[in-house]
Image: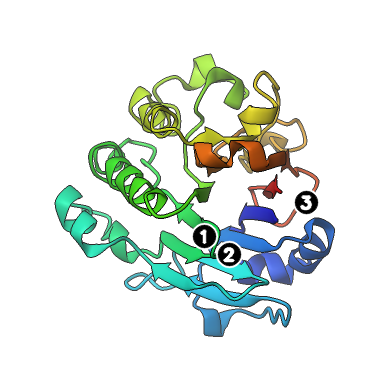
Amino acid sequence: MRIVSWNVNGIRAVHKKGEFMPMLKSLAPDVLCLQETKAEQHQSPIDLPDYEEFWESSKGKKGYSGTAIFTKETPKNVLFGFPEDLVKKYGIDGDGYGNPSEEGRVIAVDTGSLYVVSVYTPNSKDDLSRLTLRHKHWDPAFLEYMKRLEAEKPVVFCGDLNVAHSPIDLAHPKQNEGTHGYTKEEREGVDKLISAGFIDTFRHFYPDETEKYTWWSHWQKARERNVGWRIDYIFASKKLAKHLKGAGIHPGIMGSDHCPISLELS
C-alpha cells in the first residue's frame, strides 16, 4: 500500500496549474490524503474514476480549510470530523477565529486492516493567538482520538501538523525559536504523539537527514533556495513498524506551497 499526503492549498488552484494529475501519475497512491482543499466535493474539477472520494469540508467558512481522502479500495467505514464527545471534553467548539471542529480538519477511513486519517491542524497564527486552542484543546483531543482508533486496529495519520518538530526540521531554527510553528508548546504536541507510540515514518528511515522540507514561504524565493520547514508528516502505529518499507518527501512536485509526502507499507 502506498499512502500519499499533500496540502494542496486549494484543490481548484492546484488543478488549474496542471499539477494534480501529474502528481497522481507519478506517485500512484493507493490512498491519497489531502488537506486545505478549500472546496466542497461538488466544486472539485477533478474526476478520478479509479478512486472513491470522501470529503470533509468546512461547514462555516466556505472555501476554507478542508480535508479529503481518495482511495482505490472501498473502505469499510468513513468517519467525518471529531467524535462529538471529544469536542465537548476538550472544548474545541470555537474560539475568536471560528469553530475548528467544523472547519473540515479531520477525516478517517477504515480500510479493513488499518485506519487512515487525514488531518489539517489549526495554525497558531503569527501572533500566537490560536496557540492555546491548539496546545490545550486540539492536540490532546487529536491524540486521544488516534489512541481510540488504535484500540480497534493500527492507525496511519498524516497531514499538515503546522509544526516543525526538531531543529533539523527547519532551515533556521535559532531565528524561529518561539515563533508560530516552532514554539515549545507546538513541539510538545509531537513529543506526546511519539511518546504514545506513534512513529514519525520519515524519521524512522532518515533520523538525521537535514534539508528535507515540505513547506516553503512565497517570500524571497525560499523554495528555490530550499529555505523551508518540515511540517507535513505521516505517523504510524508502532504495530506497523515491521510493515514500513519506505518514506519520501517529493519537493519536485509543484502546485502548492507544500509538497507531497509518501509512505510505503507491505
Residue tagged 1: 36
Q: CA distance from mark 2 to mark 3?
A: 15 Å
Q: Is residue 235 visible?
A: yes
Q: Are marks 2 and 3 in contact (CB under 8 Å)?
A: no
Q: Nearer the viewer, residue 207 or 228?
A: 207
Q: Nearer the viewer, residue 196 or 208?
A: 196
On the image, the x and y values in percent for residue 227 come to: 67, 29
The residue depicted at 58 percent of the width and 64 percent of the height is 10
Q: Secondary structure at mark 1?
A: loop
The residue depicted at 22 percent of the width and 57 percent of the height is 87
Q: CA distance from mark 2 to mark 1?
A: 6 Å
How is the structure coloured here? rainbow
Give above or below for 227 relative to 23.
above
Residue tagged 3: 253
Left or right of 131 on screen, residue 8: right
Residue 10's disc is 2
> What amino acid is found at the position of numbered circle 2 in the picture?
Gly
Q: Secondary structure at mark 3?
A: loop
Q: Are marks 2 and 1 in contact (CB under 8 Å)?
A: yes
- Eye-nearest disc, 2 or 3: 3
